[in-house]
Amino acid sequence: MVTARKDRYLQLPSRSGVYDLSTVAVVGGGGLVSQCASYDLAMDGGVESIIVADLDISKARKVASLANALSGKRKARAVQVDVRKVKEASRAVAGSDVLINGVQYDFNEKVMDMALLAGSHYLDFGGLYWMTKRQLSRSSEFRSAGLLAVAGMGAEPGLSGIIANELCDRMDSVETIKVRDAWRDYTKNVPPFFVTWSIQTLMDEYTMEGEVLQDGKIRKYAPLALSEEYDFPEPVGSTQVYSTRHSEIATFPSSFRKKGVRNVNWMEGGPGFIEQKTLADAGFGDQKRLRVGGSLVSPRNFLAALLRSKGLLGYPEGCRPDSYECLAVEVTGKRGGKAVSERRTCIFPSKPEWGLGAAEYSVGIPGAVAARLIADGKVKSRGVRPPELVFKAEDFYPELRKRGFILSDVEER
């Protein structure tokens, strides 16, 4: 157990309605999603400084440089950290009011330890169910330190929970919550196959059993065992989506227990999804090392290294991303004694001027908005909490719309 510095974070009262300027640390700051959060925070006048922390200092410096160019000030600075060395890494982010964790989700607990030692509030972009469960069990540590840790604050999980909470609040009782996600990429001059998300996380989704709340019980299914054709708004449109392991199933059953929820399920799909699953089925998702020509090599690590060497992790240099992703949250229940089903969707655009596609923009922006709300003192929760129990739709939606997110009205199904 890590002992927190309890005196580090004390939310100061507003001075004439303006909160004290804040410092945000972005760990794993060289990653595509983390870049997005850093750039958005750089243009916020309420953020005084940004610590861009990464194992690869050259990536961190590049992000800090562009963040400073966007802000017109020397607001961001780069530091090198190895999250496996928790005490040393925590000193590098000391002074941060909020710590955004953008590292591979396997290391979430290490970065949580960093936040406790630094006395910083914390948020990450998801824990793929099993890690989220472990994180939630540490709530008393953060509560004792007077700190908040938000487990999973991106698009899905994150915004998906905020929308679900809004829709559940409109009903007297809830039977089913569906979360669906799909994408389309219209970027020109790209190779026929490339990956814009963590290949490690993708391979986990393709190889791990996925949980579903079904008739009040958690049941497990093989990856992609459940599927359906789902009607998303344009420019995404109708898409075949599939079940995978995801963090909403770790939090929604308890978050909405008082509403009587019996079913929660998640499905995703889009171009390239089945092709990537084929790689996992061929063994490239395996982590057990094989002996090849006298060397031991993990097929998964080999795949990541190969894609990196070919420039197929992220958009190729010189491409202008033109992609869209869509989240749909659908809740079925009763209101006034009558059965009702309602849905809200959100279309995420790309951010070509930052070199980011919809996948990165859709996750980084909610994380940046959440960090800002925490630093501004608008969030009173403490402990480790899921986003649906922390943030209010009325605080979140206006900020997303300012950044080009297209939130639909609530529609009956």
Image: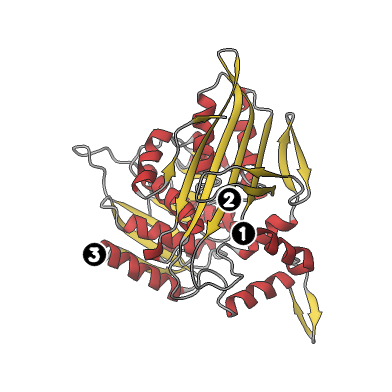
Question: Real-space Cα distance between discs 1 and 3?
Answer: 38 Å
- The residue shown at (65%, 27%) is 261
**Image coordinates for residue 6, horizontal then vertical, percent:** 43, 45
**Res 370 label:** none
The amino acid on which the numbered mark 3 sits, given as a three-letter code, is Gly
- The residue shown at (65%, 59%) is 273
The residue where tag 2 is placed is 182
- The residue shown at (63%, 59%) is 201
The answer to which of 347 and 292 lies nearer the viewer is 347
For this orientation, the residue located farthest to the top is: 337
The residue where tag 3 is placed is 72
**Image coordinates for residue 158, horizontal then vertical, percent:** 51, 44
Q: Which of the two discs, 3 and 2, labels the residue nearer the N terminus?
A: 3
| 366 on left or right of 16 | right
**Disc 1 to disc 3: CB gap under 8 Å:** no
The amino acid on which the numbered mark 2 sits, given as a three-letter code, is Ala
Q: Which of the two discs, 1 and 3, labels the residue nearer the N terminus?
A: 3
The answer to which of 138 and 233 lies nearer the viewer is 233
Q: Residues within 10 Å of mark 3 (few under 14, many from 20)?
A: few
* Secondary structure of the residue carrying numbered label 2: strand
Kindly tell me whether residue 325 is visible in this rendering.
yes
Q: Which of marks 1 and 3 is in front?
A: 1
**Image coordinates for residue 291, horizontal then vertical, percent:** 81, 80
Asked if residue 191 is positioned above or below residue 339 in the image, the reply reads below
**Res 271 label:** 1
Q: How crowded is mark 2: few (under 14 residues within 10 Å), some or many (20 or more)?
A: many
- The residue shown at (49%, 37%) is 162
Q: How crowded is mark 1: few (under 14 residues within 10 Å), some or many (20 or more)?
A: some
Q: Nearer the viewer, mark 3 or mark 2?
A: 2
| 9 on left or right of 305 | left
**Image coordinates for residue 225, horizontal then vertical, percent:** 77, 48
